[in-house]
Image (cartoon, rainbow, N blue to C red):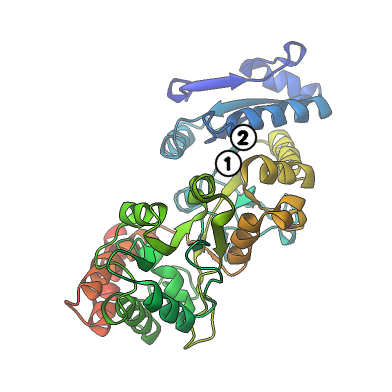
Amino acid sequence: MKKAILFILTVLMSFQFLSANSNTEAASDGNVSIEMWTKEGDADGTLQWTMALIEQFMAENPTITVEVVKKTTVDELREDFQTASLAGETPDLLWTVSDHAGPFLTADLIQSVDGLVDLSKFVETVTTAEGSWAVPMSSGNHLMLIYNKDLIQTPPTTTDELIAMGTELTTDDMYGLVYNQTEPFWFVPWLGGFNGKVFAADGVTPTLNTKEMVNALQFVSDLKNKYAIVPQECDYNAADTLFKEGKAAMIINGDWSLGDYEKLFGDKLGVTRIPMVSATKKWPAPYTAGIYLMVPKDIDAAKAKAAAKLIEFFTSKDVQYSQVNDFNRLPGLKAAYDAPKIKESSILKGSSYQLEVGTPMPTVLEMRAVWDGIKPELAQVLAGNISPADAAELMQESAVAGIAAQQ
């Protein structure tokens, strides 16, 4: 495991330092040393912030020392953790993305957090019939409607209004709306708005061949081919460029884009929910994710207790406020949504308003087969090469076959 660690930051005070080989002895003295892996980086200051939190935690809990291991990428963290688990040398706490819960659960590498914290205090987390598997540190990574106030003063609240405004705004060199048409992640909110879901209640059986899917496909096709308020071809970069150049009044994009847009547009940037589907009176439901804290399965009781105390500290209201103030991250703790910055910032307020109707992205392995099933047929519908009904049938067949291949 140690060879896999590229960068180790140790924040132990000299009098607190305990070698890895002294853990057993230290535990007998009432002291505990734990190791936490994080995906945070130093470029945006989040690693430095995390380290400062660790120092504060250890000062307040002198019997617990924490060694922080920074992984260069989220993929490296996932792969190293899976390898370390095979060798029986896991860390004691993971600070990582929610997407990792799926593969870790499938491999039986993490333990339930039901007994560690009161999960009713948090936004939705990764839950199966057997329990809940992560504590949300932050929540977000969701799509929303972002608009240029120089081009549109009041955003549409329904799809009927969206089409009417888009039609009025769209000219030869201007579009009413742009978004990444090539990725299913941008399509799923509309499926939710038409009351559809990609999985049945068991969370793993695809439900792509439904009238809700057909209606959602017809809607996005109409935006492009009937009403023509979106470009004929538009991937992520094209949409982003058109919006930044002032050639699109509205864009559907994620919270990760808000920093750049805010720098460019200042107080001319507006953020709100993706318009309600007029036909169903239901809000589109973008997938949400975030940064989650996960506890490896086979750590001893003393380390588990120390990890739980550290989780309690990370999810305290003061720390949750801090990540809002310093990094514009929406909290995992529900009570922290009263943070003054969320109330005062129209951008964070709009982002949290959208988050309220989001839905956690499934973390099961079957989701890969669903993405692969949707993407090519969505493209065919938008190109006018196939009907929504035929596309839905093919999506289902592809997803089922893909899941079977995973077995």
Q: Is residue 124 visible?
A: no
Give the Cα distance between marks 1 and 2: 6 Å
Residue corresponding to mark 2: 92
Residue at the spot x=34%, y=73% of the render?
229
Residue at the spot x=40%, y=83% of the render?
212
Left or right of 312 on screen, residue 216: left
Residue corresponding to mark 1: 296
Residue at the spot x=77%, y=57% of the render?
338
Question: What element does badge 2 sit on?
Answer: loop
Instruction: Kindly identify the amino acid type of the residue bearing the numbered disc 1.
Output: Pro
* Quarter holding residue 29: top right
* Quarter holding residue 194: bottom left
Of residues 108 and 288, the one drawn nearer to the viewer in this rendering? 288
Q: Mark 1: give few (<14), some (14-19) or many (20+) Cα within 10 Å.
A: many
Q: Earlier in the sequence, mark 1 or mark 2?
A: 2
- Examine the rendered structure and indicate whether residue 189 appears above or below residue 307: below
Circles 1 and 2: CB distance less than 8 Å?
yes
Instruction: Kindly identify the amino acid type of the residue bearing the numbered disc 2.
Output: Asp
